[in-house]
Amino acid sequence: MNIALSDIGEKLNAFRKTLGLSQKEVAVAMGVHQTQISKFENGEGSSVELLLQVLNYYGTNYNVRFIFADEFEIILSAPGDVLTSPYNSIAVEKLSLLGEEVNAQLVEVKRLLSSSIA
C-alpha cells in the first residue's frame, strides 16, 4: 500500500470540517500558520513533523486510527481514556499493516511450496 501525505491531508480535511472547525482555529490551537494547515490538507507540501503535530492536536480529544490505511476512522475519546502519543499510534498502525502484508506473503510462499510438492 502506498499512501501520500496528500491522502492523509484529504482525510484530515474532511474530519476537520465534520467537527465544524476552520483551518484558522486548528492553526491557532496548534501554534502554526493557517497556510501550513491549508497546504497540508490540499497536498501542496507538508512534512511528517506537521503531520505529527496535527495528530497530536486531534489526539488530545480523539483517537485517530488507521490514518495510513484505506479505512480511516477517528473515535471520540471517552472520559478517562488514555490516548497514546502520535508516535506510538503511528508505530502500532504501521506494524499492523506490515503484519497483514507479511501474512499475505507467507500464505503465497506456502501455496508455492505446496504446489511444488504435489
Image (cartoon, rainbow, N blue to C red):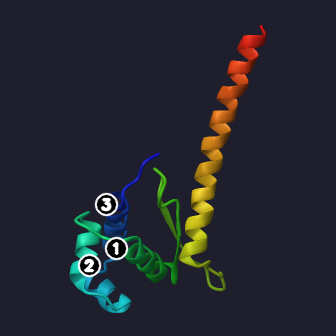
According to the picture, the residue beneath numbered tag 3 turns out to be: 6
The residue identified by callout 2 is 36
Of mark 2 and mark 3, the one earlier in the sequence is: 3
Query: How far apart are the two marked residues, 1 and 3, measured between alpha carbons?
Result: 15 Å
> Identity of the amino acid at label 2?
Gln
Kindly report the distance in space between the C-alpha atoms of the residues bearing marks 2 and 3: 13 Å
Badge 3 crowding class, 10 Å Cα cut-off, few under 14, some 14 to 19, many 20 or more, is some
Task: Give the label, 1 or 3, closer to the camera.
Answer: 3
Q: Nearer the viewer, mark 1 or mark 2?
A: 2
Residue at mark 1 to residue at mark 2: CA–CA distance: 14 Å
Position of residue 116 in the picture relative to residue 12 (left or right): right
* Numbered badge on residue 16: 1
Residue 61 is situated, as x and y percent measured from the top left of the image, at: 51, 82
* Location of residue 41 in the rendering, given as x and y in whole percent from the top left corner: 28, 68
**Which image quadrant is residue 5 in?**
bottom left
Could you tell me which secondary element the residue under label 3 belongs to?
helix
